[in-house]
């Protein structure tokens, strides 16, 4: 092959071109891709990861803000006892409660305990969801670095051509680099978060 190329061009020019191609493929192309991606794409990527994490848990967090059926029942029990106290007098209801062996107060106390448990469970679920969201947001930089590496792996030749021609030839792997990054977002999220 070298003989055929040397018939068209001088051997020194062919060798220099091959060396330049290797340098572009191994060093300058990846370095240029890395610098451009960090200058142009990483901040947007990190913002996209954070917004995606927030959107993903928004519905779940809203559900944890809703009062549970147990909490509504406990409130209804308290309201019923208050209504009885207002209608018959608090002293009379307490006396009746003592006559019944404390059944009313025990039922209200039990309902309030279940209400606290339900409220605590909602709060704990909300904290867990928020912690998960925060963990995803905290790893946004790592996820985006993974996306850059994966996209570069798919378009390394295009970046070598871009670097080797001093930006004159801009192939599809260079122009669509951010969409290649997004295409790897799920894989990178799974890799970083696992």
Image (cartoon, rainbow, N blue to C red):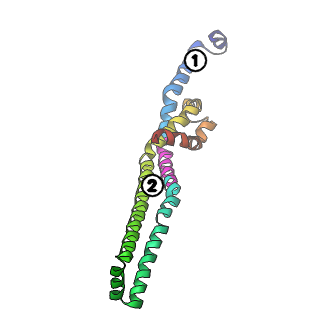
Location of residue 150 in the rendering, given as x and y in whole percent from the top left corner: 53, 35
Location of residue 48 in the rendering, given as x and y in whole percent from the top left corner: 51, 51
Q: Could you tell me which secondary element the residue under label 1 belongs to?
A: helix
Q: Which residue is mark 1?
A: 13
Residues 48 and 79: in front is 79
**Residue 21 appears in the figure:** yes
- Classify residue 161 by image quadrant: top right
**Residue 67 appears in the figure:** no
Residues 85 and 18: in front is 85
Task: Please provide the residue range marked out in magenta.
Answer: 37-52
At horizontal 47% and vertical 72% (from top left) the residue drawn is: 73
Q: Main secondary structure of the magenta part?
A: helix
Precedes in sequence: disc 2 or disc 1: 1
Q: Which residue is mark 2?
A: 129
Structural crowding at the residue carrying mark 1, measured as other residues with C-alpha within 10 Å and reported as few (<14), some (14–19) or many (≥20): few
Location of residue 58 in the rendering, given as x and y in whole percent from the top left corner: 51, 59
At horizontal 43% and vertical 56% (from top left) the residue drawn is: 130
């Amino acid at each position: 092959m070298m003989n055929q190329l040397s018939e068209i061009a001088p051997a020194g020019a062919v060798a220099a071109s091959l060396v330049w191609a290797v340098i572009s493929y191994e060093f300058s192309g990846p370095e240029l891709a890395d610098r451009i991606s960090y200058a142009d794409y990483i901040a947007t990527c990190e913002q996209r990861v954070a917004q995606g994490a927030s959107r993903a848990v928004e519905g779940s967090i809203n559900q944890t803000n809703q009062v549970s059926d147990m909490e509504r029942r406990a409130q209804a029990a308290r309201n019923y006892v208050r209504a009885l106290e207002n209608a018959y007098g608090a002293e009379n209801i307490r006396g009746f409660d003592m006559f019944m062996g404390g059944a009313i107060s025990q039922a209200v106390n039990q309902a309030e305990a279940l209400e606290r448990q339900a409220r605590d469970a909602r709060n704990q679920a909300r904290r867990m969801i928020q912690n998960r969201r925060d963990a995803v947001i905290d790893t946004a930089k790592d996820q985006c670095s993974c996306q850059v590496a994966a996209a570069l792996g798919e378009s390394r030749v295009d970046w070598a051509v871009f670097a080797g021609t001093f930006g004159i030839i801009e192939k599809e792997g260079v122009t669509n680099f951010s969409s290649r990054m997004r295409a790897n977002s799920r894989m990178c999220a799974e890799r970083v978060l696992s």
